[in-house]
Image (cartoon, rainbow, N blue to C red):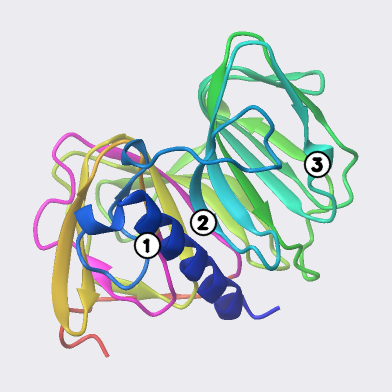
Amino acid sequence: MNERRIYSWIFLGFLTVATLSGCAARAPAVPYPAFVQLDERPGSFVAAFPGLRPQMLSSDARTGQAGYRLQVPAGWNWGTGAAPGMTVEIFILRGELRLADISLQAGGYAYLPSGSLGFTMHSENGAELLYFLDVPNRAAVIRTPLIISSDYLEWRPLAGHSGMSVGELRMDPGSGARTWLMRIDPHTDVAWQKASYNVEGYLISGDFKESECVAGKPVGGDYLPGGYFLRPAEMVHGSAGPATIGGATWLMRRLTGGDISEGLSCGKAR
């Protein structure tokens, strides 16, 4: 399925929820999800998560593709078998989640491709986590579950970007789908750039200031922990000065491969 078509439905679902919750009015005017603070968004009923009030990141009611932040109470039990035919990604923000017989602490990550047997989930003392459901990509090469801790990632400097490093969680050489952590040192600038793919990000820690180029003009906003964006392909973004004062760590995701164009400027990028 065309990725842009998928994300057009996600944008529609996102904007509907944001309007109902009142969050959109507080964010800078950008025609796609950006500068969203999850702490300002109330939880809502989702049938797939009995007993919880998930905070929605994005959704597509037609395909079932969605992203959530979940606050799970102590003693919570559930299972990934509730999402047949979908891929599942989990990232632990705090607390502990037991996935089958594996304990995931803060920074723990799991990718469960479609066709995986349903995994039981249990949190003895409660946890906060990100939970993503995606439509399977036939070009994907990774066909078995992937469970790792970010404590053991190899952090590599981002080529050509002083003060930025990447920790790879998943990179599928077939589909180009990728999930990674991005560390940005204090007082680092982010050059104006654009990607040929859709990308979403969740700020795990720190502070971040960035601008989106809308109709040739920069629209700036701030992110605090819990900040989120879902940026469509070919949208120019960057920082006019230091993007972070104290440093930042992002969780980033994309569903396909592609390229990044740099050395741009807002108003002359196209």
Q: Mark 1 points at which residue?
A: 33
Specify the segment rendered in magenta. Answer: 230-256
Q: Rounded to the nearest whole Å, what is the CA distance between mark 3 and mark 1?
A: 27 Å
Mark 1 element type: loop
Label located before the other in sequence (2 or 1) = 1
Label located before the other in sequence (3 or 2) = 2
**Nearest the eye: 158 or 14:** 14
User: Percent from the top left, x then y, of residue 237?
Assistant: 26, 69
Q: In which quarter of the image is residue 161?
A: bottom left
Label located before the other in sequence (3 or 1) = 1
Q: How many marks?
A: 3
Q: Rounded to the nearest whole Å, what is the CA distance between mark 3 and mark 2?
A: 18 Å
**Nearest the eye: 203 or 14:** 14
| Amino acid at the residue labelled 3 | Ala
90 to the left or right of 115: left
Q: Mark 2 points at which residue?
A: 58
Query: How busy is the neighbourhood of tag 1: few (under 14 within 10 Å), some, or many (20 plus)?
Result: many
Q: Name the residue under label 3.
A: 82
Residue 134 can be seen, yes or no = yes
Quarter of the image with the C terminus is: bottom left
